[in-house]
Structure formats: structure tokens, C-alpha cells
Image: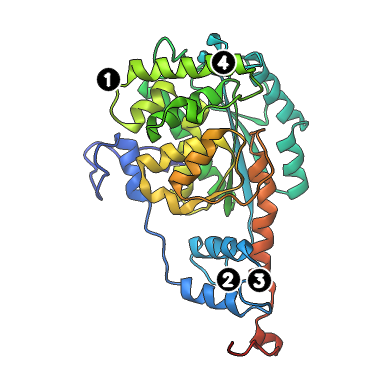
Amino acid sequence: MTKKMTQPPAPGDDSGTASPGLHPPLSWWAREIRPVDSGFDAAIRYRIDHLTKPLGSLGRIEEVAFWYASLHGSDRPPAPKGFCAVFAADHGVTAEGVSAYPQSVTRQMVLNYLAGGAAISVLSRVHGFDLKIVDVGVNGDLAGHPSLLHRKVRHGTRNFAVEPAMMPEEGLRAMEAGMELAVLAAESGATLLLTGEMGIGNTTSASALAAALLRHPPEDLTGSGTGLTPEGKLRKIRVIDQALASYRPLLASPLDWLFAVGGLEIAALAGFIIGGAVRRIPVVLDGFITGTAALAAVTLIPEVRPWLMASHMSMEPGHRRILEHLGLSPLLALDLRLGEGSGAALAYPLVVSAVSLYNDMATFEEARVSQAGEG
């Protein structure tokens, strides 16, 4: 399948069954997500249970191996080849004093990624996965950087405390940029997608979007982000609460909320995650921001859910609520709150290990080792 897949079908093409209430590109993407093929599940489970080890002794590593092999539809799945996309964008809501860092840090950190000096840069080198940095909405000129993927929709979102963060066409362009990255990953031979983001102010957008989609009070979901004082956190909650109250009578669909209070990088991540399901590539989520993007993706297209794995539990309180809603159990408990794909990158070698153990360990029969008797 080629990159034209990021575009909706031509007018009049109504093949398949569109999900009700979705914008045409999304309804088309939803039709492209085929059900997970469980035809190899019994063989995968048999092999896991007959490897030379006590039954279940590798704990959740066995769960990871089953998830990966089942989604790849094979009892001998390919070795994981990771592809991490870090989407960067700025947020107009920073004008409300909701971040401990100035907006300029987004651009500065993108340059740090490109120079190889950030955590995700180091982890990509250590663990050998592809890393792509994507500008979907940084408020600054990043032209002239050949290693940066330039997909800028606009120079940051609008201040959602005053007006909607994005126009629908802007949000859809960001989602299509994410879908395009999933296509690029598939064409490069990737078998596992890792999610990352950068954007000063994005915990405010994520908290607002999560509160709207989960219908929870913002104070239950909002944390200190980059290190706000208690007073700053209260101001952040107040900004979110007032915005939700003003938009609630006007908005109906999850897509409305994504565009009203979300971020361009969150929209792009939602497209990337949906793209993983479309291209049948499992997706490892990072933290709170990518979790919120996954929440939006699954709310829009429930068929995305089986393709997701949570790398860790962020220190941001909203992340726990999101993972509980999605039914995802994090692999790691490291008190991370960095973002930029760091948690997904740290989980990546666990997936590699799980698949290697599954593929390369001998079974009792192959090794001629006696199995445990009954009881």
C-alpha cells in the first residue's frame, strides 16, 4: 500500500461500511482496519506454554510475546524493528501561565533531538530503532534541517481558553501527517511503532481533552506538568475547567473536543496510532500525552484498541485514568514524566526480548527435556 492511503477515497466511493458520525477521512480509515486474525492464537499459546521453562514463569514477558505474535498473525513473528515518531508542536494556552517553561523550549528541544542530545536520541542509538522528529506545529522557523520532517500545519494552536485550538481542517491535516508517518514506517519495514511528543503546554491540552472524553473533573486528571507550583497547578485546573464549561454546550463529538482543546501533536499522534492499526503494526504508547492521543483514537475508532500496549504509568494523574479506561496495564513502573517517547523506548528492548525468547527458546520436545507431571 502506498502513501496515497493517507488520502480519503474520491467523492462517491462508498465502498465498505463507514463508522457513523465520523468525518470522511476517519470513516475511510476505520473501514481499512481489519479484525485481528486469531487463527494462530492457539499455536502461539501452545508454543509459549511448551518452551523449556515452568508454565507461566516468564510472567508478563509471555503476555508481550503473545500480543506481538498474535497481531502479526504468525506463530513465528518477525523480530521487532522499531520506528519512533516524535511529533512536536506548540500550544497557545501557554499564554495563560499553565507551564513552568517558556514556549521557546519546544523549538530548542527539537534542535536538541536533531543534534542527538536528548533522552530519546540516546535511547534510539542504544536500542537501534528508527527515530523521526516531526514538526507539525512548532512556533518557530525550523527550515534548513534536512533530518527534520516538515509537516507544519500552523505555528502552534490558538489559546483554547479564548477560542478553539484548531480549525477542523487544521486538525485533520495534523492527523493525516500522523497517518503518513505510519505509512512511512510500514514502507521502511517497521514491525513496531513507538510514540513520542514534545510541546510546552501539552499536559494542559491533554488534561482538558481527557477530562472531556472521560467526563471526569479536571482536578482528577491534571498534574504539575513540567513542574508547576501548587498555585500554578490550581491556575491550570481553573483554565481547563472554564474552557470545558464554555465549550460543553457547543460540542458533541470526540473529534470536536480534539480540535477545540487538543494539540497539533496530539492530533498527529492519534493519526499515527490509527495508522498503526490500519497498517497492522502494533503500537507502544509512551506516557500521558500519547495516552490521551490513544484515548481519542479509540474513542473515534474502537477497533484500534487491540493494537496498543502501554509502556509505563506516568506520574501525571490523568494517565492512570486513561489506561484504566482503555484496559491497558503498563509494563514499567519507573515514575517517568519526561515524555518525548522515553517510556516507549525503554519498553522496546522488553518487546525485543519477549519475541526473541518466544522464537529462539527450545520447546521441551525440541530439547528432549522432560516436562512437569500432573500436579
Residue designated by label 1: 249
Q: CA distance from mark 1 to mark 3?
A: 53 Å
Q: Residue at x 42, y 48 (%)?
A: 304
Task: Please give the residue where the numbered disc 3 appears in the rendered image.
Answer: 57
Q: Earlier in the sequence, mark 4 or mark 3?
A: 3
Residue sitting at x 50%, y 30%: 221
Closer-to-camera residue (301/131): 301
Q: CA distance from mark 1 to mark 4?
A: 24 Å
Of the residues shown, which amino acid type is indicated by label 1? Pro
Residue 98 is tagged as 4
Please state which amino acid type lies under the numbered disc 2: Arg
Question: Which one is nearer the viewer's eye here, 45 or 9?
Answer: 45
Find out whether the residues at labels 1 and 4 contact each other: C-beta distance under 8 Å: no
Query: Disc 4 on helix, strand or loop?
Result: loop
Q: Residue 62, located in which quarter of the rendered image?
A: bottom right
Instruction: Measure how far apart labels 1 and 2 are at the Cα level.
Output: 52 Å
Q: CA distance from mark 4 to mark 3?
A: 46 Å
Q: Which mark is residue 226?
A: none
Query: Nearer the observer, disc 3 or disc 2?
Result: 3
